[in-house]
Image: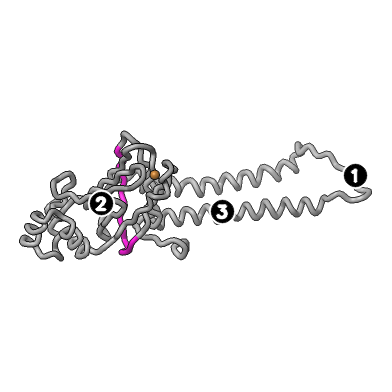
Amino acid sequence: MLERYSTAASTYAHWIDYQFLLIAVLVGFWLIVAEAMMFWLIFKFRAKDGRPTQYITGEETHLKRWITIPHILVILCDIVIIVPAIMVWYNIKQVLPPADATVRVIGQQWAWSFQQPGPDGVLDTADDIRTVDEMHVVVNTTYHFELMSRDVVHSFAIPAFRLKQDALPGRTITGWFRPNRVGTYDIQCTQMCGLGHAMMASRIIVETQQDHAAWLIRNSNPAVAERQALSSPASDGLATMTEARR
Ligand SMILES: [Cu+2]
């Protein structure tokens, strides 16, 4: 339902959407009930000529029920919200599924830069590809990201993936995502990080294996690219890399 308003492009986007929907429906229901009751009481017991004011302490048992019963119902609704919320949190933030690839994401005032494995599929080697404001990933591939900051606190957010993670100077935070829809999506910094905060808009391009292999070869060191082209057709580039990693 929420997908009509915001594209969902990762495997866990729907978990977050359902959680939002659950909260909106339950909280919305109680909001309407409470507001309706309040306005009904205001209207029913409004000042009228000749009607004496009543002083009600609320200590009588039959009146206390008006507090106790809704209170219990609200607590039950809290449990209905909190249990799936913990499950969603656990499955996204605590569990780290095995990665097909690892990328590094670095926040700084005021840009995102990305370090990705080159044709060898291994991070921190000579053929790594470094980009600014643009990240390329393969659809239906599980990525680990190593998130860090060069200066202040930033927050790495890809709304279409429903992904948001703070980047803290001095720490490397590992997370994961698995894009499941080809397309170009926004990357935003969602932590006010200084004057140029708004300039940190970047994008992530989710592409097919073939397109990604071609991008890798286009952006690699020419000598490495040549070796890659000789050893395997462009369309197999990533498959070969993935095999090599296993
Ligand atoms: Cu920032």
* Three-letter residue code for mark 2: Thr
Farthest-out residue, right: 50
* Three-letter residue code for mark 1: Pro
Give the magenta range: 172-184
Which residue has dot 2 on it? Answer: 131
Residue drawn at point x = 90 percent, y = 44 percent: 52
**Comes first in the chain, label 3 or label 2:** 3
In the visual, does 52 lie left or right of 117? Answer: right
Element on which disc 1 rests: loop
Alpha carbons under labels 2 and 1: distance apart = 76 Å
The picture places residue 135, in percent across and down from the top left corner, at 28, 54
The picture places residue 167, in percent across and down from the top left corner, at 35, 41
The picture places residue 226, in percent across and down from the top left corner, at 8, 59
* Three-letter residue code for mark 3: Leu
Residue drawn at point x = 72 percent, y = 41 percent: 64
**Comes first in the chain, label 1 or label 3:** 3
Alpha carbons under labels 1 and 3: distance apart = 38 Å
Residue 181 drawn in magenta: yes
Residue 229 drawn in magenta: no
Which residue has dot 1 on it? Answer: 52
Farthest-out residue, front: 195
Which residue has dot 3 on it? Answer: 26
Q: Is residue 95 above or below residue 218?
A: above
The quadrant where ligand 1 appears is top left
Alpha carbons under labels 3 and 2: distance apart = 44 Å
**Comes first in the chain, label 2 or label 1:** 1
